[in-house]
Amino acid sequence: MLHESLRSEIPGRLEEIAVVPIHELLSRIHWDKAFGEGVFEIGYQDHVERRIVRVPFARVHLQKGNRFSFQLETDLDGIVTIPFHRVREVYRHGVLIWRRTGLG
């Protein structure tokens, strides 16, 4: 789901961004300089803390062609691998722009 207030701020049609798979959205933020301008955060499901943890996108490292996971810099564990299916939310300037739907 994409927050409607970003319709004019984020290039691309609202419907296209709302249904894009998370690996494609994160790749676009990373590789498309015009689209990726701004302060982004992702929220992923942390199984240890049993909650959604928000981290700056600057700590996310994508590998070109990897559609299954990304590397995340953490303060405690160094670099960890996070599967894309654990990403639940994406924020731009603190505003929710994408949320994984269909979770119980």
Image (spheres, rainbow, N blue to C red):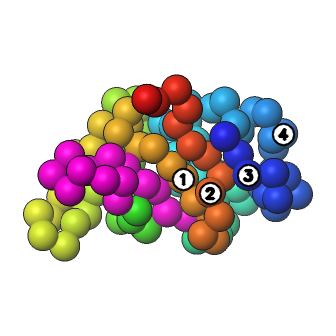
Residue at position x 72%, y 59% in the image: 34
* Contact between labelled residues 1 and 4, with CB atoms less than 8 Å apart: no
Numbered label attached to residue 59: none
Residue at position x 31%, y 53% in the image: 51
* Contact between labelled residues 2 and 3, with CB atoms less than 8 Å apart: yes
User: How far, Cα to Cα, is label 2 from label 4?
Assistant: 16 Å
Q: Earlier in the sequence, mark 2 or mark 1?
A: 1
Q: Earlier in the sequence, mark 3 or mark 2?
A: 3
Relative to the observer, which residue lies in front, 71 or 87? 87
Residue labelled with disc 2:
96
Residue labelled with disc 1:
90
* Contact between labelled residues 1 and 2, with CB atoms less than 8 Å apart: yes
Q: In front: mark 4 or mark 1?
A: 1
Q: In front: mark 2 or mark 4?
A: 2
- Counting the numbered discs, the total is 4
> Splitting the image into 4 quarters, where does residue 88 fall?
top left
x, y percent for residue 77:
11, 63
Q: Secondary structure at mark 1?
A: strand
Q: In front: mark 3 or mark 4?
A: 3
User: How far, Cα to Cα, is label 3 from label 4?
Assistant: 12 Å
x, y percent for residue 44:
37, 49
Residue type highlighted by circle 3: His
Relative to the observer, which residue lies in front, 10 or 101? 101
Q: Residue furthest front?
A: 104
Residue labelled with disc 3:
3
User: How far, Cα to Cα, is label 4 from label 1?
Assistant: 17 Å
Magenta span: 40-53
The quadrant of the rendering that contains the C terminus is top left
Residue labelled with disc 4:
13
